[in-house]
Image (tube, rainbow, N blue to C red):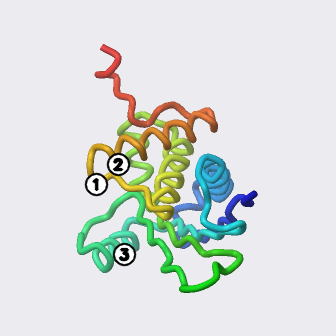
């Protein structure tokens, strides 16, 4: 049986000081996500950087060729050939405070819930989930909904237009 991933959270921007429970939120979200998926090793690690829009814009520009801020980026770790090391490093996740806060406000969602969603979303990307086409998006979003429901968080993809 796999252990929940160790999530090393680095607060790399002062703006995150306004959200004192951010590290706990991220760790809880990743542990919940891990309980829904098969991990590639008995012991795994993930690094999460809580940063600001300026830094995530640099990362997005340098690694994805998109010169703009975004909410979350995931960088899966290259796996060494041969035996799987224990613990296995899954990769890195970066989450931007200002974009996360703006999206939460715009979508009328609690900041903590949106942060949980982004941590889960980033974690699933590390495991190979994606949303490049409709089938992939449906699978990934369904999994996100299930994980968030376990945390008591409403469907982030539900819109009031769907209720009509």
x%, y% of residue 163? 35, 17
Real-space CA distance between mark 2 and mark 3, rounded to the nearest whole angstrom: 24 Å
Q: Is residue 22 above or below residue 52?
A: above
Q: In what element is the residue under mark 3?
A: helix
Question: Which residue sits furthest front?
Answer: 82
Of residue 65 and residue 114, the one placed in the foreground of this image is: 65
Callout 2 environment at 10 Å: few (<14), some (14 to 19), or many (20+)? few
Q: Which residue is label 2 attached to?
A: 136
Q: Residue at x 54, y 86 (%)?
A: 81
x%, y% of residue 26? 61, 55
Contact flag, marks 2 and 3 (Cβ < 8 Å): no
Question: Which residue sits furthest top?
Answer: 164
Q: In terms of sequence position, does the residue under pointer 2 or pointer 3 come before the other? A: 3
Contact flag, marks 2 and 1 (Cβ < 8 Å): yes
Real-space CA distance between mark 2 and mark 1, rounded to the nearest whole angstrom: 6 Å
x%, y% of residue 40? 60, 65
x%, y% of residue 38? 60, 55
Give the label on residue 59, or none. Answer: 3
Real-space CA distance between mark 1 and mark 3, rounded to the nearest whole angstrom: 20 Å
Of tags 2 and 3, the one toward the viewer is 2
Q: Which residue is label 1 attached to?
A: 132
Q: In terms of sequence position, does the residue under pointer 1 or pointer 3 come before the other? A: 3
Q: Residue at x 65, y 65 (%)?
A: 7
């Amino acid at each position: 049986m796999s252990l929940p991933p160790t999530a090393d959270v680095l607060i790399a921007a002062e703006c995150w000081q306004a959200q004192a429970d951010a590290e706990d939120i991220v760790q809880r979200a990743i542990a919940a996500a891990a309980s829904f998926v098969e991990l590639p090793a008995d012991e795994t690690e993930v690094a999460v950087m809580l940063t600001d829009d300026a830094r995530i814009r640099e990362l997005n520009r340098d690694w994805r060729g998109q010169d703009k801020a975004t909410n979350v980026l995931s960088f899966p770790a290259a796996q060494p050939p041969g035996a799987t090391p224990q613990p296995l490093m899954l990769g890195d996740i970066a989450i931007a405070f200002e974009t996360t806060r703006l999206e939460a406000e715009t979508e009328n969602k609690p900041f903590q819930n949106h942060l949980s969603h982004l941590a889960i979303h980033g974690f699933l990307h590390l495991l190979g989930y994606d949303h490049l086409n409709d089938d992939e998006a449906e699978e990934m979003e369904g999994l996100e909904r299930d994980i968030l429901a376990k945390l008591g968080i409403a469907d982030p993809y539900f819109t009031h237009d769907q209720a009509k």
